[in-house]
Amino acid sequence: MKKAAHILIIGGGGTGAALAHDLALRGLRVTLCEKGELLSGTTGRHHGLLHSGARYAVNDPVAARECIAENRILRQIAPGCFEENDGLFVALDDADMAFHERFMEACRDSGIPAADTPLRLALQWEPELNPGLLAAVRVPDAVMDAWRLPMSFFATARRNGADLLPYHEAVGLLQSGGRVTGARLLDLRRRRPFSLEADMVVLATGAWSAQMGKTAAIEIPVQPAPGAMVAVTPRLVNMVINRLRPPGEGDIVVPQRRLTILGTSLWLADDPDRFQISNEQIRRMVATGAEMVPAVATAAVKSVWGAARPLLSAKDRSAPQDISRRFLCIDHFDRDAVEGLVSIIGGKATTLRAMAEAGADLVCKKLGHAAICRTAVTPLLPHREFYR
């Protein structure tokens, strides 16, 4: 029998987890390395919103359609990872009301179920909502467990033969004759450097992709975009609450276990490891959240943290909220005349499976490996199986 090709995935976040699962399911030999603990980057730090796509329906319809499609698939293949509690977009002023018609039309065009909800009913569902709200629209948002979902992908990938290497930092790419042939790794636990050869390398390093590209003299068009989130206690809502307006700062309130997550701010940075969250940002998150849910103003702040989004680079850096949330798979032979290297950048936690499918399709095409994607219909193991 022909020996299965070996794929090295660099990056142990959600995209890497879903990609390891997809490639292993297609019968390829998979090794994944991550410089820290699995999910210790952006994936383990987001607010846990499973997007319906409604947030992007007006300004980024491609991303909106991607979100609603994956929203439905993930609920089917990963039961137990979500609170299927839906969401409300709420209008609080005339500007919000002026956005309402465009919003509803864009949701219809993107295939997102959006229904005007009587104010009496919205306040019955969510008593802590601002009683002065002018409109409420129900959408199929949900709350995901930011760790359990990707760990389910990791558990299933490992069951199917994937080799997972946390605390193994990729410090450079091996190259020979214009081809990437593997990576130089550093085992951080043993402080032992070694080289790992592979038939193809996939960068699933998110906001750190540009840094990895530099090790091969390749420019990868990813823009680190940090955001701050604030967790307050107690849990004040049971549905995801969004402001009915174009995406901005602090316009999402997410229930997460016994907490209420306020988010998020957005700015652009050059280094995903070096950014600071100011007291002013925290104040803004609380103030804008309190406009929708007044009790936020007096809730106790439990914790504050940040994560760097891996946005696609844009020429206009003055309006980061307008940068697309779509994802991109790059064949670096086509783009940079470097064979054996693929990058997956952009996207969201909601679209991790779709990003992996596109990346795996590209890998299989380049290898001449005839295997279709089955991740949309293959149930994942429970996350607990990873620890057994």
Image (spheres, helix red, strand yellow):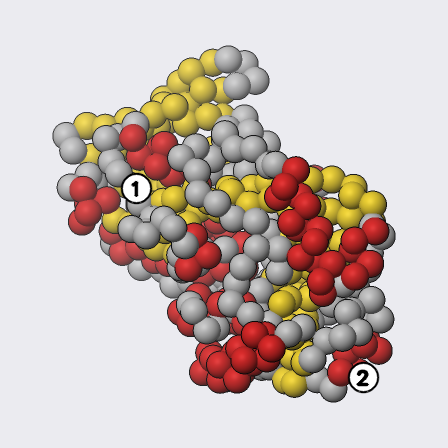
Q: Residue 37 carries which label?
A: none
Query: Measured along the vertical axis of the image, is residue 124 above or below residue 329?
Result: below
Looking at the image, which residue is at 62% across and 43% down?
281
Q: Which mark is residue 220?
A: 1
Looking at the image, which residue is at 36% across and 32% down?
211
Query: Measured along the vertical axis of the image, is residue 46 above or below residue 120?
Result: above
Q: Position of residue 169 (x, y in %)?
A: 46, 26
Query: Measured along the vertical axis of the image, is residue 6 above or below residue 349?
Result: above
Q: Where is residue 172 in the image (x, y as percent from the top left)?
A: 34, 25
SS class of the residue under badge 1? loop
Choose the circle earlier in sequence order: 1 or 2.
Answer: 2
Q: Which residue lies furthest to the top in this view?
A: 191
Looking at the image, which residue is at 60% across and 36% down?
277
Label 2, residues with CA under 10 Å away: few <14, some 14-19, many ≥20: few
Query: Measured along the vertical axis of the image, is residue 218 above or below residue 287?
Result: above
Quadrant for the C terminus, please: top right
Give the left or right position of residue 197, taking residue 37 as reference. left
Q: Which amino acid, by three-letter code, is at mark 1?
A: Ile
Looking at the image, which residue is at 35% across and 37% down?
210
Report which residue position mark 2 lands on: 120
